[in-house]
Image (spheres, rainbow, N blue to C red):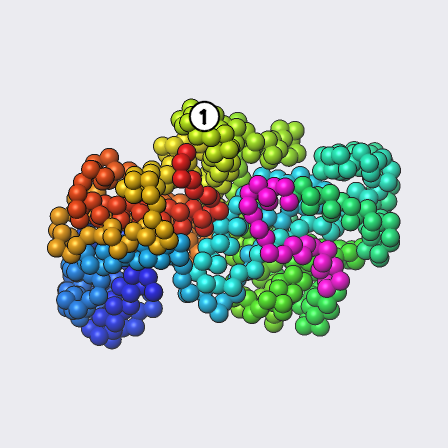
Amino acid sequence: MTIKEQIKKDLQKAIEKSFGNEMEDVYIEHPQDSEHGDYASNVAMNIAEGVGKTPREIAERIVSALQPGKLRCASKVAVAGPGFINFYLSDKFLVDELQRILDRGDDYGRSRVGEGETVVVDYSSPNIAKPFGIGHLRSTIIGQAIYNIYKFLGYKVIGDNHLGDWGTQFGKLIYAIKSWGDEGEIAKDPIKKLNELYVEFHRQAARDPSLEEEGRRWFKKLSEGDPEAHRLWEKCVDWSLEEFDRIYDILGAKIDYAYGESFYEDRVLGIVEEAKNLGFASESEGALVIPIGDNLPPLMLLKSDRTSTYAARDLAAIKFRQKEFGPVSKMIYEVGGDQSLYFKQLFLAANKFSWGEGIDFVHVAHGMMRFASGKMSTRGGKVILLQNLIDSLMEKARAIVEKKNPRLSESEKDQVARVVGVGALKYNDLSQNPRTDIIFKWEKALSREGNSAPYLQYTYARCRSVMRKSWRGEEPEGKAASSTSEVFPVAGEFGLWGIEERALLRTLYRFPEVVEEAAEVCSPNLVCNFLFDLAQKYNLFYAKLPILKSAGNVRRFRLSLTAATAQVIKNGLNLLGIGVLERM
Ligand code: ARG
């Protein structure tokens, strides 16, 4: 249990004791002003209405029921203002937590709250024979972070790459390959060539509508297992996956499964039968739909030509996941906001089936990413290929390290360029609320000063450098590397902490609760905000107080703060899929 939950529990108990109220949700937060303690609750205001006392009186009653002297982690609880209850964490708690960070190391923040629950994360999901778009990039980066965070909390997590590898467009593509394509040529630059063929199909079909019929004919052949149609389709899949895998490699994305839409083609009939039997499918203008209500358009299962839809395959996927991995408690879709209406319909439809009942469906609807100069799109001609984007980031990162740290070896510089370049790309995305549109600015992404990956990586490297110097070049082995037992303060000196030391201590312990909150609202940016705050506090501390030049217990204490800061930054960045460097 995190300290935050502990305090909530204590509050709940005290409220029940004083007023007999069972409060499910007691809201507590970190006050803006640290003078007001580490946690504050406005619960007294909420209770006051029903009780006929002033919030202050109620707050006082709650505090006396809390018996502050007996609380495990708070040294003081005070009533403030109109009736806020403020908690001040004890020095002992803060120091114990510092010790825990050093003891648990890479596992600090890991927990078992999710044990016994299964979460599916549907992410990345690019389309075969189409470019890997910026939307898919965002989905891959954010989806992977959400996946990592849930895993860290002990959930059983299933990552599924719902590849767009089925649908009538493949009939058109196959027709186009057969009519105008050359497989040998395509193989040289598949996605580009396939995309061109697809565009060509639409250009010609605009003049000659009979082509649409050809496209349908080939899709029908594909569905019926025609060997030639199937061979070409499979080629498209292989060509595309080769390219996608290159991107996943660079990003370090590892997605457990990639069933893809085609996997569900045979399962769609089952869904259709079920919907008919249960009486919630109906014919509409030749198509088969599930009416949704709620003023939403119905969800189409079969088109008028009886081919299946994207939606039908998504329903089949939900059923399959539930049977294969379930019971699934949460299914998270990291997909662009342009599909918001669709997911609303899908989730309502899924909830009608026994296998979809009770699943907590979440659509993390990411916004668009633009470049400082206009929208990034694969259609409008202004194509900035992902590979180019990543290459330029690495190049720029390399130029910076060349300037800042010319003495590093060539291979070290390459490594810095890669870890910083990819980190900058990911962090730019992750540090903002996924649901907003974001703008990509090179300077900001690569800045060593602002809220960026390089800033955090740089702070980490700074901490590590301080630690290396404290060992005078001889790195202790294993656990001693963070020198838990040696690098530690004595109890009697608590009172002597400087403002910056205290500020750091009062931030470090929050990491586990931040991770839980980030999972709850599927927002890795909460982890970023926290890390940025922590790094700023460390750098203030570093600027104000001597570490290596101090002596005795003070020195030990400051070194342990340094080691703990490095550890927490590393754990946080690791969840975001971003690496750290010893030197940069
Ligand atoms: N392939 C789709 C696209 O690029 C995204 C699929 C998202 N996942 C899903 N289960 N519908 O738009």
Residue 494 position (above or below residue 468) = below
Toward the top, the furthest residue is 403
Amino acid type, callout 1: Glu
Q: Residues within 10 Å of mark 1 (few under 14, many from 20)?
A: some
Which secondary structure lies at badge 1? Answer: helix
Which residue is depicted at the point 75% across and 62% down? 266
- Can you say which quadrant of the picture contains the C terminus? top left
Quarter of the N terminus within the rendering: bottom left
Is residue 180 visible to the viewer in this orientation of the structure? yes
Question: Which residue occupies the foreground of this view, 235 or 395?
Answer: 395
Residue 562 or 216: which is nearer the viewer? Answer: 562
Q: For the point 23% across and 55% down, which residue is it? A: 95
Residue 135 x, y percent position in the rendering: 58, 42
- The residue depicted at 82 percent of the width and 44 percent of the height is 174
The residue that label 1 is drawn on is 402
Q: Start and end of the magenta stretch?
A: 245-268
Some atom of ligand 1 lies within 8 Å of the CB belonging to the residue at label 1: no
Residue 528: quadrant of the picture: top left
Side of 300 relative to 157 (left or right): right
Q: Can the viewer see residue 534 in this picture?
A: no
Left or right of residue 136: residue 106: left
Q: Position of residue 568 (x, y in %)?
A: 36, 49
Q: Main secondary structure of the magenta part?
A: helix
- Relative placement, left or right, of 559 versus 70 is right
In reply to whether residue 180 is colored magenta, the answer given is: no
Is 262 part of what is drawn in magenta? yes
Residue 354, image x and y in percent? 61, 72
Find residue 272 and report its horizontal and vertical position in percent.
72, 65
Of residues 423 and 19, the one nearer the viewer is: 423
- Name the image quarter holding residue 111: bottom left
Residue at 52 percent across and 42 percent down: it is 367
